[in-house]
Image (cartoon, coloured by chain):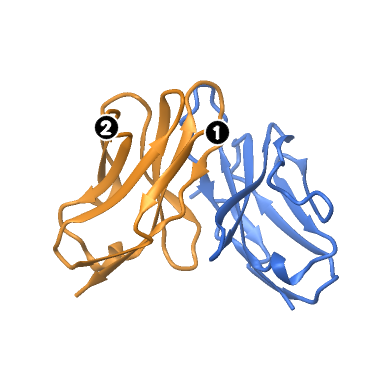
Chain colours: A blue, B orange
Amino acid sequence: DARVTQTPRHKVTEMGQEVTMRCQPILGHNTVFWYRQTMMQGLELLAYFRNRAPLDDSGMPKDRFSAEMPDATLATLKIQPSEPRDSAVYFCASGLGLAGGGNEQFFGPGTRLTVL
Amino acid sequence: AQSVTQLGSHVSVSEGALVLLRCNYSSSVPPYLFWYVQYPNQGLQLLLKYTSAATLVKGINGFEAEFKKSETSFHLTKPSAHMSDAAEYFCAVSKSGGYQKVTFGTGTKLQVIP
C-alpha cells in the first residue's frame, strides 16, 4: 500500500557535519510537510510545499536549514552545519492539497538524528 | 491564529475502562479538527477528523470525538480501553477554507494498565 518513505531512518553525526534527509511522498500527493519532534518542543512544523513550491518555511532556522523539492517524488531537508541541538526525530508527511481544507496528512516513519 | 490545548500530558486507564483525552481549541473561524495517534517509533496516523458535518465523529479502532462549539472542545473517547491503545495522541486544528497548515497540540501519552 502507498506510504511515505524516509531515508535514512537513523543518522549519527558529529557537530559541524552536513546532514541530508530524504522523503518520498505518496504518489499523487501535492503537499509535503517537514516536522521536527523533540521531548521539549513537541511537534514543530519546519516547512511545507504545495506543488513543489515552498509555501511556508517560517519554522525553519534559515541560517543552517534548507528544504527543497527537486521533483514531485523527492523532498530533501538539509542541515549545514549541524549542531547538537538539532538532535530530534524529523518527520515528512504528504497529503492531497484539496481546496476547502481538512486534508489528512500521511506521515513517514521519521529520521532519528543524533548530533554529537 | 488557531491553537489547541491538550489537558494532561499523561493519562493512565485500566484495560476495559473508558478512555477520555481532552482537547480544547482556539480559532477565530470555524475550524477543522483532527486526532492523530503515534505508536512508538512510528509516524503519526489519522484517527478521525471533524470538517463541519456531523458533530459526533467516529474514527478507527473504536474511537470517537464530539465537536462542542459552546465549549470549544473536541475530546476523544473510547468506551473500553485495549492494551493496543497505548500510544501518544495528538489533537490538531486548521482553519477551514483553502489549504491551511495544521497546528498540533503537545500530545497525551496514554498508558493502559492490565
B31 to A79, vertically: above or below: above
Residue A79, x across and y down, in percent: 79, 59
**What residue lies at 30% left-to-right and 28% top-to-bottom?**
B69
Task: Answer left or right for B31 relative to A28.
Answer: left
B104 to B113, vertically: above or below: above
Three-letter code for the amino acid on which mark 2 is drawn? Lys
CA gap, disc 2 and disc 1? 27 Å
Q: Are marks 2 and 1 in contact (CB under 8 Å)?
A: no
Task: Answer left or right for B66 relative to A11.
Answer: left
Three-letter code for the amino acid on which mark 1 is drawn? Leu
Residue A103, x across and y down, in percent: 48, 33
Task: Answer left or right for A9 relative to B21.
Answer: right
**What residue lies at 15% left-to-right and 53% top-to-bottom?**
B79
Residue A56 in which image quadrant: top right
Residue A51, x across and y down, in percent: 69, 31
Q: Is residue B63 visible?
A: no
Q: Quadrant of the C terminus of chain A?
A: bottom right
Discs 2/1, front: 2
- Residue at label 2? B68
- Which sits in the foreground, A27 or A45? A45
Evaluate whether label 2 is on the same chain as label 1.
no
Q: Is residue A28 visible?
A: yes
Q: Chain of mark 1?
A: A
Residue A6 in which image quadrant: bottom right
- Residue at label 1? A96
What secondary structure is marked by label 2? strand
**What residue lies at 43% left-to-right and 42% top-to-bottom?**
B4
Graded by Cα atoms within 10 Å as few (under 14), some (14 to 19) or many (20 or more), the crowding at tag 1 reads: some
Mark on residue B109? none
Graded by Cα atoms within 10 Å as few (under 14), some (14 to 19) or many (20 or more), the crowding at tag 2 reads: few
What secondary structure is marked by label 1? loop
